[in-house]
């Protein structure tokens, strides 16, 4: 079953490969990059139907003007630019914490935790699949929560809850040989960690 499950991801790639030539080019790409206004109008009509789309074209023209007046910076220029310093620090912090938050360790050791929790050998891959499904569903939920609470609240809340779950998981893994129910608590914590990861970072 697993080879078929892995191969199924190729199905969506095949659908995209076959259907992509029939999609129109992006109107902003045609106008901003290619400078072809007629092709841009044709693409807009194909995407949004007949009608007056001058307002959309004016917006794209404004975007083109803004891009023309913006200087493209090299990597070293971005690092040296004082006005971009805080944005750079924030970006580096978010990317570093995302890499070091522990999600890779959770995925790597989850099989061992499930095995220790006395799950049947044939069930463990499905439980692991459930962990991945939890992340997918929580990411979808995050897209609805981000408009309501904002990015900062979700980042702070997600990292705080992930820290708490990791602390509890460390404790349950240390005590799993003393109390039989600690194995199951560890499994619950793994699912919670993945949910908080999907909703936060």
Image: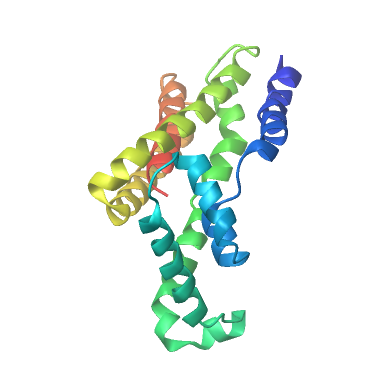
Provide residue 109's location: percent of width, then percent of height: 59, 35
Where does the N terminus fall, quadrant-wise? top right
Relative to residue 15, is residue 97 depicted above or below? below
Q: In this figure, what is the number of numbered marks?
A: 0
Provide residue 64's location: percent of width, then percent of height: 49, 70
* Horizontal side of residue 91 vs 148, given as left or right: right
* Horizontal side of residue 8 vs 113, given as left or right: right
Question: Seen from this angle, which residue lies furthest left?
Answer: 148
Quadrant in the picture for residue 21:
top right
Relative to residue 126, is residue 102 depicted above or below? below
User: Can you see residue 29?
Assistant: no
Q: Please tell me which residue is depicted at 60% across the width and 44% down the height of the picture.
A: 24
The colour scheme is rainbow
Q: Please tell me which residue is depicted at 60% across the width and 62% down the height of the picture.
A: 36
Depth check: 184 or 192 in front?
192
Quadrant in the picture for residue 107:
top right
* Horizontal side of residue 6 vs 81, given as left or right: right
Depth check: 143 or 92 in front?
143
Relative to residue 135, is residue 42 depicted above or below? below
Quadrant in the picture for residue 34:
bottom right
Q: Please tell me which residue is depicted at 55% across the width and 48% down the height of the picture.
A: 42
User: Can you see residue 24?
Assistant: yes
Q: Please tell me which residue is depicted at 44% across the width and 19% down the height of the picture.
A: 180
Provide residue 112's location: percent of width, then percent of height: 61, 29
Provide residue 146's location: percent of width, then percent of height: 31, 46
* Horizontal side of residue 149 vs 159, given as left or right: left
């Amino acid at each position: 079953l697993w080879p078929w499950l892995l191969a199924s991801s190729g199905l969506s790639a095949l659908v995209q490969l076959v259907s992509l030539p029939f999609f129109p080019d992006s109107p902003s790409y045609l106008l901003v990059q290619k400078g072809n206004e007629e092709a841009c109008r044709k693409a807009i009509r194909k995407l949004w139907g007949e009608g007056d789309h001058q307002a959309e074209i004016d917006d794209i023209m404004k975007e083109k003007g803004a891009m023309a007046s913006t200087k493209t910076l090299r990597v070293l220029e971005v690092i040296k630019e004082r006005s971009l310093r805080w944005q750079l620090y924030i970006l580096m912090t978010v990317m570093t914490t995302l890499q070091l938050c522990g999600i890779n360790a959770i995925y790597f050791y989850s099989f061992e935790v499930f095995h220790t929790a006395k799950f049947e050998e044939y069930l463990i891959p499905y439980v692991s699949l459930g962990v991945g499904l939890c992340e997918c569903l929580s990411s979808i939920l995050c897209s609805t929560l981000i408009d309501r609470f904002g990015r900062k609240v979700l980042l702070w809340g997600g990292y705080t809850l992930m820290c708490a779950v990791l602390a509890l998981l460390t404790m349950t893994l240390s005590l799993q040989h003393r109390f039989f129910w600690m194995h199951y608590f560890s499994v619950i914590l793994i699912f919670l960690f993945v949910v908080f990861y999907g909703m936060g970072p």
